[in-house]
Amino acid sequence: MKETKAVLWGLGAMGSGIYKLITERAGIKITGAIGRNPQKFGQDLGESAGMKPCGVKISGDAAAVLAAAEADIVLHATGSFFKEVHPELLQAVRAGCNVITIAEEMAEPWSADYALAADLDKAAKEKGVTVIGTGINPGFVLDALIIALTGVCFNIKKIEAERVNDLSPFGHTVMSTQGVGTTPDQFARGVEEGKIVGHIGFTQSISLIARALGWELDRIVEEKDPIISSTSRQTPVVKVEPGMVAGCYHRAYGYRNGEIAISLKHPQQIRPEAEGVETGDYIRIEGTPMVNLSIKPEIPGGIGTIAMAVNMIPLVLAGSPGLKTLVDLPAPASWSKLR
Amino acid sequence: MKETKAVLWGLGAMGSGIYKLITERAGIKITGAIGRNPQKFGQDLGESAGMKPCGVKISGDAAAVLAAAEADIVLHATGSFFKEVHPELLQAVRAGCNVITIAEEMAEPWSADYALAADLDKAAKEKGVTVIGTGINPGFVLDALIIALTGVCFNIKKIEAERVNDLSPFGHTVMSTQGVGTTPDQFARGVEEGKIVGHIGFTQSISLIARALGWELDRIVEEKDPIISSTSRQTPVVKVEPGMVAGCYHRAYGYRNGEIAISLKHPQQIRPEAEGVETGDYIRIEGTPMVNLSIKPEIPGGIGTIAMAVNMIPLVLAGSPGLKTLVDLPAPASWSKLR
């Protein structure tokens, strides 16, 4: 079988990680790289990722790369929001490429923007390609894994899940979007002004679960509160004194018949161990039978998302055309050779 | 959309459970029931399941039921082994029905009997129907769930899983096939004579995992040891004194490049709490990242299998023709209305 050709679009930490993982897999070759950072233009993709040269130069000219790369698939990692990435995804589709994106809202794009999703779905069907969003959260822990567990149940009354993680490894951007290091007043103002966003993807996860179960929800409500530290906590980029904010406790609830039917909680903070908080992913399904699952520690978001994006490739290549979500395809497995 | 019509084939504890669950779901109707027990022939299916009459009579004449029922799908629960159920599955397929079976070996029929599987696959494709085996174990805990978790990983070195359950609710048949209540000598003889079989499906689970990961295995090895009780344990059907056998500790190992790459353990015993054993399902993937999952207590095999069989229905109705396994289709979700 001929080698599969892929273009990387977006070369930050996630895109570089995807590149490295693909170099370990057989049957797939990177034939183009589209970056956003002009400082990287002209650099060799391999060298830019801290590896040996691979002969592919990073370019800012998406049209030229897509025209030359003869790619079967685009691996896309430039942004979080559907509106923001839609033109790029559409351009990749129009170039005849299947697309895997890690944009959070693409885990369930219909709930983010129905018209844009319908537009992208139509374009994908016209070109005979598959487009899908994936990741760890959204994309796995708080949605696809929950949905798979519902398969062993009936009479489900309520689903509760919590993802408790550690922000300590992250840089300035994450600290500011989660409000780490602010005072409680600054946190409240940051949330109001939309600068402290917490987790992106709750609407996607809840919509995916509800759709899989055939549940009509009344509404989805999100709440964000500061995690106020009672100890001193520090990372290389931020210091939090007692009384200051160590992270964001973000929750989302899906209401059905006036009651909470889906409850997702995601406290994110630095140094959770400072106050005895154990990280982990927890799922509890109130049904017949009850399901009570723990994954300790939590599945790490960064390398997990890189793995999901690469592991999806054979399923997307074989998938039927259109804009898909994770519930439309078999679960990806960790393959080593494309066949 | 027209109502989906289903035939039940096999009306033991599992078949009756499937019937009850289907009566709670919308969009599907039972139009035929094939039994094996002559004492039930002519009885109303509903009454036989301890519910109100449903107008469907239980029959032993499979050909007549299949001819009259105009069924879209057969829900099959008569036996464990592929050789034993193959004629029934083939008959259902030739009648133009999709099939969901809970026969353990059908979770991965190719490893049970390649020629029979190829034959059934061909018949299903000719008739344009989908055939699949499902269940909790094999079918979920020690295979499909593990495979889904590998999707968040790369560089997997080893997979270890253990399912620790409680046989106390089961009857005489399970006690004797697991060797509960025997002496250690009787247990050894029972294993040798093939009367104490332990768990059915290890080959299926290991083959499914290896296929999903693209691993070539050297061999699959199974081991069975008695769980010798140091306390007195009792259920309504069996009594175990200290020194006697409380259950079967059955393991299976998939070797790759001379080393154990997949290790599945399944100790089954009565009253595990008598010696401080906590029941649960445990999965550990040695890869990047490591995944360490617990489900406590374990997902119950009986009602879980009933749920899986019914929850698979929409996926099988929509599936492409042929003999499939769980890794070929999206994970089933707990639906309430067929659309």
Image (cartoon, coloured by chain):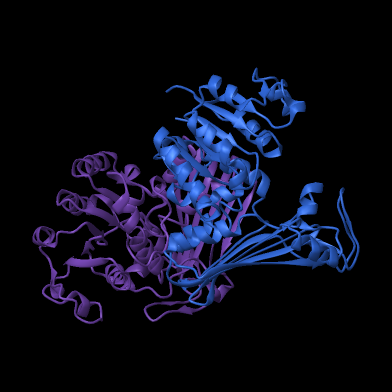
Chain colours: A blue, B purple
Residue A265 horizontal side relative to residue B316, left or right: right
Percent from the top left, x then y, of residue B304? 41, 66
Q: Nearer the viewer, residue B112 or B332?
A: B332
Q: Nearer the viewer, residue B284 or A121?
A: A121
Residue A171 horizontal side relative to residue A141, left or right: right
Q: What residue appears at the point 39 percent right and 69 percent down from the top-left corner?
A: B303
Q: What residue appears at the point 74 percent right and 26 percent down from the top-left corner?
A: A40
Task: Give the farthest residue toward the top.
Answer: A55
Report how many numbered discs are placed on residues in the image: 0
- Does any portion of residue B100 appear in the rendered image? yes
Percent from the top left, x then y, of residue B120? 23, 44
Q: Nearer the viewer, residue A194 or B103?
A: A194
Percent from the top left, x then y, of residue A235? 86, 52
Quadrant in which the N terminus of chain A is drawn: top left
Q: Is residue B291 above or below residue B233?
A: above
Residue A259 horizontal side relative to residue B338, left or right: right
Percent from the top left, x then y, of residue B143? 46, 51
Q: Is residue A153 above or below residue B134?
A: below
Quadrant in which the C terminus of chain A is drawn: top left
- Does any portion of residue A276 appear in the rendered image? no
Q: What residue appears at the point 32 percent right and 48 percent down from the top-left corner?
A: B319
Q: Nearer the viewer, residue A108 or A310?
A: A108
Residue B88 horizontal side relative to residue A221, left or right: left
